[in-house]
């Protein structure tokens, strides 16, 4: 992989934008700004319901993502997603939660 200068200090690095030290500092700041899961609205009720939905899905369908804009496919990286996003008034009830792989969940975003 081509070496590039760090955006902060100019040292050559194989990382896309920052050297290891500055990447770690940048990530720490991003995490601080983002807040904890509870601060973002994903508290104990969501975590309980999400764990139950994921367990039910694995018991019924195994490690298969039902897909979003893609056919169903095997995946070891399953996540729980809101059907109606929280940003659009969705809640954390089990009926509003579904399972998608991380790639499909990212593709869906807040739609």
Image: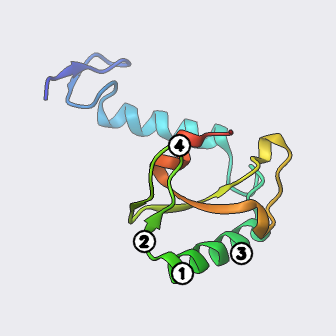
**Residue 33, above or below 48:** above
The C terminus lies in quadrant = top right
Q: Nearer the viewer, residue 66 or 37?
A: 66
| Residue bearing mark 2 | 63
Q: Are marks 3 and 4 in contact (CB under 8 Å)?
A: no
> Of marks 3 and 4, which one's residue comes earlier in the chain?
3
| Residue bearing mark 4 | 106
The way the protein has been coloured in the rendering is rainbow
Q: Label 4: few (<14), some or many (≥20) within 10 Å?
A: few
- Secondary structure type for disc 3: helix
Which numbered circle lies on residue 68?
Answer: none
Measured Cα–Cα span from mark 4 to mark 1: 23 Å
Closer to the eye: label 2 or 4: 2
- Secondary structure type for disc 1: helix
List x then y, in percent, for residue 87: 78, 41
| Residue bearing mark 3 | 48
Residue at 49% across, 76% down: 61
Measured Cα–Cα span from mark 3 to mark 2: 20 Å
Measured Cα–Cα span from mark 3 to mark 1: 18 Å
> Of marks 4 and 1, which one's residue comes earlier in the chain?
1
List x then y, in percent, for residue 1: 13, 29
- Secondary structure type for disc 4: helix
List x then y, in percent, for residue 78: 49, 63
Closer to the eye: label 2 or 1: 1
Residue at 72% across, 72% down: 49
């Amino acid at each position: 992989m081509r070496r590039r200068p760090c955006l902060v200090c100019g040292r050559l690095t194989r990382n896309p934008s920052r050297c290891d030290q500055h990447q770690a500092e940048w990530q720490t700041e991003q995490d601080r700004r983002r807040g904890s899961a509870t601060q973002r609205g994903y508290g104990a009720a969501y975590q309980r319901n999400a764990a139950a939905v994921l367990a039910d899905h694995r018991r019924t369908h195994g490690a298969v993502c039902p897909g979003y804009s893609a056919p169903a496919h095997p995946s070891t990286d399953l996540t729980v997603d809101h059907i109606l996003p929280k940003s659009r008034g969705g809640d954390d009830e089990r009926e509003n939660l579904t399972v998608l792989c991380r790639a499909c969940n990212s593709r869906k975003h807040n739609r």
